[in-house]
Amino acid sequence: MVTLDQGHGTTISLFTDVSAVIFDLEGVLLDTETTWDEAQCALLARRGHQYNRDALKHRLTGLGAAEAIEVLIEHYRLPDEPRALMDERQHIMTDLLGRGVRYVPGALDFVRHAAAIVDVCVATSMAPELLTVVTAQTDLRATLPSPIFSPADVGGVAKPAPDLFLFAASELGANPAECLVVEDAPNGIAAARAAGMPCVALCTTHERDRLRDADFVFSSWQEVPRIGSRQHRLTNPAQ
C-alpha cells in the first residue's frame, strides 16, 4: 500500500492506484461536529449533566442515532426511553443546523479534483432527516459531484459496521480493496477496515492518536495528496 522510494520522500500508492474515493460527510466535508457537541450539551443540561467530550466524542462520532443514544444512556445512566431521547436530540440538531452549515476548508476542492479522475461518493451515518436539513442549508447536492449514501440505504445499519461502505462500493461498481475512504473518526476508520478498504483520516474532529488505525493521518485537507499524485513527501504517517 505504501512503498518507500530511493530518496527522502514516500510514494503513496494509496493516491495513485484507487478506482474510487468514499468520503465521510461530517467532519470531513461539512463542519458539523462542533454543532453535535452543542447538541449533546443542551440535551444533557436538561437532565442536570455536563457533556464530557473527552470521554464520549470518540465513541459517538460516526455512530447512527440509535447507537449514539445508547452510549449516552449507558454513560449517564439516563432513565429516558431511547426513542424519545433520540427524537429530542434530533429536534435540537435540526434547530442548530437550521442556523447554517459550513464546509470544512479545502474539502470541496479536493472532492472536485478527485471526481475528475475517479468515481467518488459520500457515505455518512447522519440520519436522513438531518441530511435533508443539511442539504437545504447548503448547496451540497448541486456542488458535490457524487451520490450521498446513508444508513437508510442499508437497512439502518451505521458505522462501525462495514455495510455502508460496502454498499457504496457496490453502487460505484468498485472493488472494495481499490476504494480509498476519507474519515475523521475511529468508528469510521473501523468500518473501512472491516470493509477491507484503505483509509486516511483528518484531524478535524479528533486528536491524531485517536485516528492511529488509519493508514495515514493528516492535519487538514491542505496536507492530503491529490488523487493521481505520483509522489508526496510524507511527514505524518499514522503509525
Image: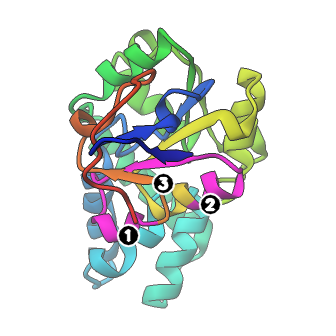
Instruction: Kindly identify which numbered label has been placed on residue 160.
Output: 2
Q: Which residue is mark 1?
A: 210
Residue at image coords 30%, 56%: 205
Foreground mark, 3 or 2? 3
Would residue 27 be found to the left or right of residue 82 on screen?
left
Q: Disc 2 vs disc 1: which is toward the camera?
A: 1
User: Label 3, label 1: how many angstroms apart (C-alpha)?
Assistant: 13 Å
Which amino acid type is shown beneath numbered disc 1? Arg
Which mark sits nearer the N-terminus, 3 or 2?
2
Q: Badge 3 is on which residue?
A: 215
Front in this rendered view, residue 92 or 206:
206
User: Percent from the top left, x then y, of residue 165?
Assistant: 67, 42
Q: Which amino acid, mark 3? A: Asp
Q: Percent from the top left, x then y, of residue 35? A: 27, 51
User: Would residue 43 be found to the left or right of residue 228 on screen?
Assistant: left
Separation of disc 2 and disc 1 at Cα?
A: 15 Å
Q: Is residue 154 visible?
A: yes
User: Element at badge 1?
Assistant: helix
Q: Secondary structure at mark 2?
A: loop
Which residue is painted at 33% across and 71% down in the image? 209
85 horizontally vs 10: left or right? right
Residue 80 location (% of width, % of height):
53, 79
Does residue 70 appear left or right of residue 230 in this picture? right
Given contact means CB atoms under 8 Å apart, are the residues at marks 2 and 1 in contact? Answer: no
Q: Is residue 211 magenta?
A: yes
